[in-house]
Image: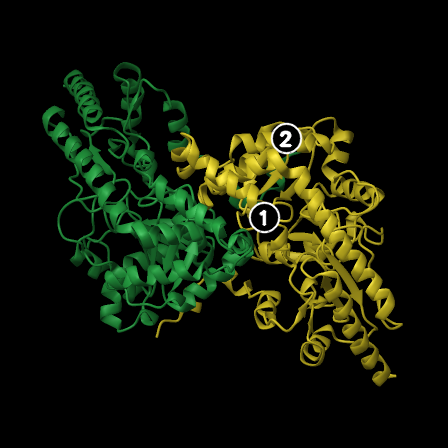
Chain colours: A yellow, B green
Amino acid sequence: MLNWEAIFATRSSRMRASEIRELLKLLDKPDIISFAGGIPDPKLFPDEQFKAAYADVFAGEGAGAALQYSVSEGYKPLREWLQGEMGRIGIDCTADNIFITSGSQQALDYIGKLFLSPKDTALVGWPTYLGALQAFNAYEPTFDQLTLSGNRTPESYRGAAQKAGGEVKFAYLSTDFANPTGETVDRAGRERLLAMAEELDIAVIEDAAYQHLRYEGEAIPPILSLEIARKGSIENTRTIYCGSFSKTLAPGLRVGYVVAATPVIRKLVLIKQAADLHSSTINQIAIAQVAERYFKEQVAKIKSAYSARRNAMLAALDRYMPAGATWTKPEGGMFIWVTLPEGMDGAALLARSVETEKVAFVPGQAFFADRSGTNTIRLSFSCADEAMIDEGIKRLGRLIGGVIAAAA
Amino acid sequence: MLNWEAIFATRSSRMRASEIRELLKLLDKPDIISFAGGIPDPKLFPDEQFKAAYADVFAGEGAGAALQYSVSEGYKPLREWLQGEMGRIGIDCTADNIFITSGSQQALDYIGKLFLSPKDTALVGWPTYLGALQAFNAYEPTFDQLTLSGNRTPESYRGAAQKAGGEVKFAYLSTDFANPTGETVDRAGRERLLAMAEELDIAVIEDAAYQHLRYEGEAIPPILSLEIARKGSIENTRTIYCGSFSKTLAPGLRVGYVVAATPVIRKLVLIKQAADLHSSTINQIAIAQVAERYFKEQVAKIKSAYSARRNAMLAALDRYMPAGATWTKPEGGMFIWVTLPEGMDGAALLARSVETEKVAFVPGQAFFADRSGTNTIRLSFSCADEAMIDEGIKRLGRLIGGVIAAAA
């Protein structure tokens, strides 16, 4: 028998199946109220707009080009549309500062490839987006805890990285309504991060996947816009902004984007050329058309639906959660993060919840690079209607209350 | 000013722009007869079939699923269709042996990621597909020359790899009508490669991108099918078969596939999950529909067109090329490889050819890992009509004849 493990590269041992993915497979049953999947509601997709966009591709003379190979940096009209969008949020740039990826997950993979040598350090939140941990992991880094509260100095990060055998290369964070916590980094936090990145001479990876989904409060300028304001030009910035159409238009087309200084864009284009040549031509054309014609209306539509669901979940948590559990109050996005009493195990709770209450969620531990956070869980409100949310949280509150009472 | 080079990973210095891509940009002028681009003729794409396939996605209830996230291994009906296709060429497998990628370029990137640690050795042809060199290069390997003529022993490969600081991990080759040479590895060569891979205990990467485009002669069984015949089951094989719809249906959708033993497929699925989650859902559905309804007709259509162009180019070469130039006689594919007299420089010839003859091609040096092969050029016949082929080769023959005469 062939011993594949002996032939595989050492890095491949770091790749493991996402627990969440495995979990979602197990939970894919019709009788379960699921707050597990962090995906957009397919009933809200702009089907009619996409139907028209694909039909238009084949109506004109352009079908040949839409089905043909195209350039690695991405479809120019889409990059130009994004340039306008970026301008509106304080990111003054040209189309040459914009690079199209196959979803923002691909941006994270390429950023790992561009920056991380084995043993280098990536600063990430405790918890953080699991997909970022998975993407970076392929390049064998060490993770250190990114904290904006000021109890870690640049020197302490540098020292820890040297001890781990490499250098700090970047800080990664999701700025708005982050997956998994739903929390947003305030303006002061963004400014502190920039100052620290400056001192450490590292890149800042700004994951803006949920930025359009704000349901209340005022928008906070992206880190990249704050840095452009400081430095006078995007060409002097160290922030790499990662955006996506997956949460606004549709994820199944796999279209995301990176906005950054041109030396970074040029490297990412080379990486993409070697890795998959370019993102789907026809999908970039379809996304460009739907974005041009319908982006605002679509964002308004999903914000209205998701914000009602968020409100329903926050109200239900207030109503049904026992004392001892606390949770975030996100101003947008898809997630609420619940901290259970110390000692309670989110994974064990899930097993009981699915069995006795038919309610699913994701145990929080998966989102911690150090595997801590056992007493946390992630609830997603994006795919359940308000009545189901009320019923599901009621059952979950009852279960958690019972566990607390039994332990007392 | 930010010094990005100091922050980038060491591997990023290995990534350089493809000369061919840069070249094609320069040559993109209407008055040039181009034999440079190795791309399918967009006039032959099955537009009407794709138009119907995308329309069908939005006609039924399934639009939500087509626009949604999907599984990393790929769309099941497409994998099942491929299973049937594979069965017809002697590759007996299940859908679990099949993994969908965003074009076969992505398969090469993931294979590099899976197998290559820095300093490991990849065996490749001299010349070989430039995209393979680029994909593997990101993982910092050494390249050694794969030769099936028997003048290298397994021991010599192993010794050279150890000297380079790693191990031989795989042999990569394009089996049929390879890019850039148009040559096909005969059955005996495939069997010798399997025997050598066995002795070295390495994987075989079989690039079958052009396999469907045979215009004459009998099909030779894929290496994977030969190995299944030896070993009794795909689960006992070491060959990783990479296929693509880019040369048959259309490249712009970015859909390719890998067929291999399940331990390899499982790892590739994990890599994809971390790298871009999955290939475009809607494009996989569209490809599956067009493949199911129209694959045979489409392959017959393009074979008829390309074989006429190949015939025209071979006839023109016979007619116009001066003594001293030799070329391959491909039984399929898109390329003819010309070897010029020793000492003649393909790149210098291109500069003169574009200026004085308005004819473009690709200098062969780019396809050699050791940058040898200066006296070679690649001609593509896929995108020019027969009259243009005759005229272009006439001019090129005249130019080469003049250079030979001047040197004599």
Label 2 marks which chain's residue?
Answer: A
From where the camera sits, is residue A18 visible?
Answer: yes
**For mark 1, does the 10 Å Cα neighbourhood hold few (<14), some (14 to 19), or many (20 or more) residues?**
many
Out of B366 and A213, give the one closest to the viewer: A213
Answer with left or right where residue A114 lies relative to residue B77.
right
Task: Identify residue type, mark 1.
Answer: Ala
Answer with left or right where residue A109 lies relative to residue B196.
right
From where the camera sits, is residue A182 visible?
Answer: no
Quarter the C terminus of chain A occupies: bottom right
Label 1 marks which chain's residue?
Answer: A
Residue highlighted by disc 1: A250
Q: Position of residue A390 (x, y in %)?
A: 78, 66
Task: Identify residue type, mark 2.
Answer: Gln
1 vs 2, front mark: 1
Residue depicted at x 24% and y 37%: B335
Q: Looking at the image, tell me whether mark 1 or mark 2 is earlier in sequence order.
A: 2
Q: Where is residue B57 in the image (x, y as percent from the top left)?
A: 47, 50
Out of B85 and A22, give the one closest to the viewer: B85
Q: Say above or below: B304 vs B240.
A: above
Residue highlighted by disc 2: A83
Quarter the N terminus of chain A occupies: bottom left
Q: Position of residue B177 (x, y in %)?
A: 23, 45
Residue depicted at x 55% and y 63%: A14
